[in-house]
Image (spheres, rainbow, N blue to C red):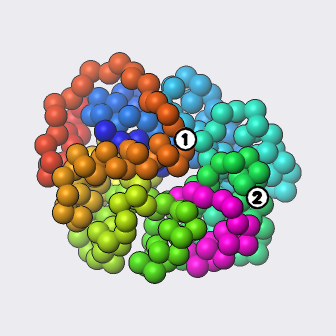
């Protein structure tokens, strides 16, 4: 079973039942959780959650949607944080050119600096790119020598090709389960398998069967079933491939086995059992 390569474990939506939520995910076979922080004020809490859960792999960054909360000194703090706390990536960082009021130049400054920090640290980046894929590509080319994943990839096949040439993988989650997402589904079906990662972005971006509800890492199985169907391959083959992709990018050698009562096996083509 795969690693959820993008889940906000530290989100306040999980405060009431975080341990139970993680146990539900483990019970259906999710083997690990890459958890990106979004503001400097949240880094310590995420580090504490990861310390208590060896299958939670933290990343630390400054998300463009929270631009008003970032300060220049947070960049120096980020360098110290990733030096002092085991992390699998820098992020979530990136650009958001959809939301009005988020100054593009200021966003770009924080993003480029985080790319440079990741490059020096030898870490991949987890990138948010909303209406900003070309701008993200330009920043990555400017810095050079950094790899990572474009989370919840919103772009075209041509942009996917450019990112592949730069060493970037692409993350797909709940949106791909929606039948109307035709362009997204075409990208998922046609990109090289080695470029593909699966994610949930929980508690956000729920799959089609949980529209309007809080998302959880258990939905990764529904995403996997949809992606395997779109690509015309067995889900088991897909899961093996994306697991290898995630481990290679984030340098996760082994995933600890933590005890939670297993749920019944979920056959290919069926959504997971949400009642567990």
Spatial separation of the CA atoms under disc 2 and disc 1 = 19 Å
Above or below 195: residue 264: above
Q: Is residue 167 left or right of residue 25?
A: right
Above or below 232: residue 139: below
**Main secondary structure type of the part rendered in magenta:** helix
Q: Local crowd at mark 1 within 10 Å, few (<14), some, or many (≥20)? A: some
**Secondary structure state at the residue bearing disc 2:** helix
Q: Which residue is mark 2?
A: 116
Q: Measuring 54% from the left and 44% from the top, which residue is drawn there?
A: 250
The answer to whether mark 2 and mark 1 are in CB contact below 8 A is: no
**Secondary structure state at the residue bearing disc 1:** loop
Q: Measuring 84% from the left and 56% from the top, which residue is drawn there?
A: 72
Above or below 227: residue 49: above
Displayed quadrant of residue 171: bottom left
Q: Which residue is mark 1?
A: 251
Q: Measuring 35% from the left and 55% from the top, which residue is drawn there?
A: 206
Q: Earlier in the sequence, mark 2 or mark 1?
A: 2
Specify the segment rendered in magenta. Answer: 132-149
């Amino acid at each position: 079973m795969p690693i959820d390569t993008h889940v906000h474990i530290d989100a306040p939506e999980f405060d009431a039942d975080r341990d139970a939520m993680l146990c539900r995910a483990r019970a259906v076979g999710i083997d690990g959780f890459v958890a990106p922080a979004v503001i400097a004020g949240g880094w310590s809490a995420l580090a504490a959650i990861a310390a208590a859960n060896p299958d939670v792999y933290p990343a630390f960054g400054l998300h463009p949607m929270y631009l008003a909360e970032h300060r220049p000194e947070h960049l120096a703090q980020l360098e110290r944080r990733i030096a002092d706390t085991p992390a699998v990536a820098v992020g979530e960082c990136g650009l958001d050119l959809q939301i009005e009021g988020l100054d593009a130049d200021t966003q770009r400054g924080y993003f480029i600096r985080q790319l440079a920090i990741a490059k020096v640290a030898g870490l991949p980046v987890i990138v948010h790119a909303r209406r900003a894929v070309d701008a993200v590509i330009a920043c990555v080319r400017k810095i050079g020598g950094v790899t990572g994943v474009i989370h919840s990839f919103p772009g075209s096949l041509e942009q996917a090709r450019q990112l592949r040439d730069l060493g970037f993988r692409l993350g797909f989650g709940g949106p791909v389960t929606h039948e109307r997402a035709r362009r997204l589904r075409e990208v998922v079906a046609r990109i090289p398998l080695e470029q593909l990662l699966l994610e949930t972005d929980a508690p956000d971006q729920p799959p089609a069967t949980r529209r309007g509800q809080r998302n959880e890492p258990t939905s990764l199985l529904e995403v996997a079933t949809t992606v395997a169907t779109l690509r015309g391959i067995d889900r088991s083959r897909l899961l093996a491939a994306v697991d290898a992709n995630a481990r290679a990018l984030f340098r996760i050698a082994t995933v600890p086995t933590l005890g939670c009562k297993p749920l019944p096996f979920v056959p290919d083509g069926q959504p997971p059992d949400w009642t567990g």
